[in-house]
Amino acid sequence: MTAIEVVIAYGEALGKGDIPTAFSYFSDNVKWHQPGDNQFSGLKNGANEIGKMIAGMMEVSKGTFALTPNGNLMVNGELVAMPLRFSGTIEDRKMDMNGIDLFKVENGKITEVWLFSGDQEAENTFWGK
């Protein structure tokens, strides 16, 4: 699979809520760079740590956290950028903003992911410490 095919397959599985299939596109030592200064920020090593972070996001948002691709994937060699919109609700706090997920794909597996938020301060406030 090409880098873009891997990211498309990952995104389709994630969109269906099929986490095991989505995570099957990760390399064993995948690194995930979660931006900001909030309870979920920082480097996550491996699918287990990434899964715990996502489960935590779903728990505190009572399942309202959602990602929706909203633009064409862009490719530069082994790097694939995915424009998206993400949203959620925690009590009286709402978040709805654009972002970019940047994937590094090597040998048919996602080896590293960097996330970028359209308004990092607002995202930090949303997730809290």
Image: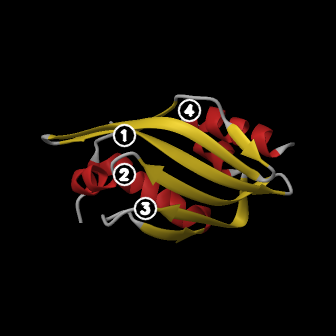
Which is nearer the eye, 25 or 33?
Answer: 33
The circle drawn on residue 35 is: 3
Q: Amino acid at mark 1?
A: Phe
The residue pinned by badge 2 equals 57
Q: Quadrant of the C terminus?
A: bottom left
Q: Amino acid at mark 4?
A: Gly
Q: Amino acid at mark 3?
A: Pro
Circle 3 sits in a helix, a strand or a loop, which is it? loop
The spot of residue 13 in percent (x, y) is 64, 36
| Vertical side of 128 occupied by 7: above or below | above
| Vertical side of 101 occupied by 37: above or below | below
Q: In the rendered view, does 64 fall on the left or right side of 98?
A: left
**The image quarter in which residue 92 lies:** top left
User: Callout 4: few (<14), some (14-19), or many (20+) C-alpha neighbours within 10 Å?
Assistant: some
Q: In the rendered view, does 28 fall on the left or right side of 83?
A: right
The residue pinned by badge 4 equals 15
The spot of residue 15 in percent (x, y) is 56, 32
User: Callout 2: few (<14), some (14-19), or many (20+) C-alpha neighbours within 10 Å?
Assistant: many
At x 52%, y 68%, the residue is: 44
**The image quarter in which residue 88 lies:** top left
Which is nearer the eye, 108 or 82?
Answer: 82
Please report contact status of discs 2 and 4: CB closer than 8 Å, yes or no.
no
The residue pinned by badge 1 equals 65
| Vertical side of 9 occupied by 108: above or below | below
Q: Earlier in the sequence, mark 3 or mark 1?
A: 3
Please report contact status of discs 4 and 3: CB closer than 8 Å, yes or no.
no
Q: Amino acid at mark 2?
A: Met
Circle 1 sits in a helix, a strand or a loop, which is it? loop
Q: What is the spatial separation of the Cα atoms under label 1 and label 2, in whole angstroms?
A: 7 Å
Q: Earlier in the sequence, mark 4 or mark 3?
A: 4
Q: What is the spatial separation of the Cα atoms under label 2 and label 3, in whole angstroms?
A: 14 Å
The spot of residue 96 in percent (x, y) is 32, 35
